[in-house]
Image (spheres, helix red, strand yellow):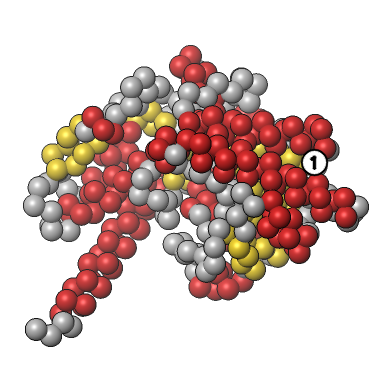
Amino acid sequence: MKVLVTGADGFVGEHLVELLLGAGHEVAASTLALPPTRDTLSADMLAAADWKAADVRDHDALVRLISAVRPDQIYHLAGFSSGALARAQAAEAMQVNAGGTVNLCEAVVAVRDEFQEFDPRILVMGSGDSYGDAAREDVPLSEELGLRPVSAYGLSKAAQELAAHTYRRARGLRVLAVRSFNLVGPGQAPHFVVPDFCTQVARIASGREREQIMRVGNLDVERDFTDVRDGVRAFAMVMDLAKPAAAYNVATGSSVPIRRILEWILDEAGVRPEIVSDPARCRAGEIARIRGDASRIRSETGWAPERDIEESVREVYRWVASRFRSRQTDQVSVSEGVQE
């Protein structure tokens, strides 16, 4: 099967590409620019995918990409994935997430008009953040609830999903959305909470930090975490359904306090720094507990998380710490080679 993945060198994209290649699919991997970045893909996996450059803001580039590949399935992951970055660049987040999805759908329509047999299944990666205010009712969030975003990121993802469903209804595209809650695993950017904690702790554990201080936000909030490898497996399973619904939550159905996440990381590192609350890391009106209702995807596909989230968090720390040590070794090697 021919599969196209946009945003293929992102955190989720790399894990998805690995899964798809392992399943024997022919994978065209689209990125903003070439060569792709690589954090978790092996050199063999990197070589096995067909890497292509395309900006989702460029309609014509997407037409050329899709016309050249003519995939059976499209996983649309490209876009802003960070709430912090979306807050700082709200208009651009909307342009990339919602506008990029419109461009993708328009490109598929254009190629379908030229090749009548072309009718790919399209998965758009939405977000549990789109539920917004609905989470204040402290109930598991189901797909039947309305999307009520309260953040720039949630707005951009809700608009992205609305765009996708519009093309499903109006143009007959075979589009579905997955609303992922918090995904975690090796390769995630350091501005997300788990790798941020891991990076701070790795620096402290290295012994090179003068102050054994860790800066945190609100540790009492609770979030629904799923290992990214379980997440991408869920994506593939809904893509293979004969008649999928319009949207699926990808979640565990339970929440974990951020304080517990931090405890697991500190235990793995074997350090006990001073914990300092940083007002810059706290958000006014933050929702206390968010968890997703995953009963739809469980009943229709049989999917369930296989990885224990505590072990996933500990693995992220080991991954971050290993990279941190490697960078330190490289810096020492360079400095030792300098001749005065």
Residue 87 at x, y percent in the picture: 42, 34
Q: Amino acid at mark 1?
A: Leu
Residue closer to the observer: 87 or 301: 87
In the rendered structure, the answer to whether residue 253 lies left or right of residue 1 reads left
Judge whether residue 302 can be spotted in this image.
Answer: no
In the picture, which quadrant includes the N terminus?
bottom right
Residue closer to the observer: 293 or 47: 47
Judge whether residue 37 can be spotted in this image.
Answer: yes
In the picture, which quadrant includes the C terminus?
bottom left
User: Which residue shows up at 75% across the image and 50% down it?
Assistant: 107
Residue that extends furthest to the top in the rendered view of this protein:
137
Q: Is residue 54 above or below residue 313?
A: below
In the rendered structure, the answer to whether residue 113 lies left or right of residue 294 reads right
Residue 179 at x, y percent in the picture: 58, 35
Residue 55 at x, y percent in the picture: 60, 55
User: Which residue shows up at 54% across the image and 63% down it?
Assistant: 33
Residue 297 at x, y percent in the picture: 65, 35
Q: Is residue 56 above or below residue 91?
A: below
Q: Classify mark 1: helix, strand or loop.
A: loop
Query: Counting other residues with Cα less than 10 Å from the Cα at mark 1, is it few (<14), some (14-19), or many (20 or more)?
Result: many
User: Which residue shows up at 21% across the image and 77% down it?
Assistant: 334
Q: Which residue is mark 1?
A: 173
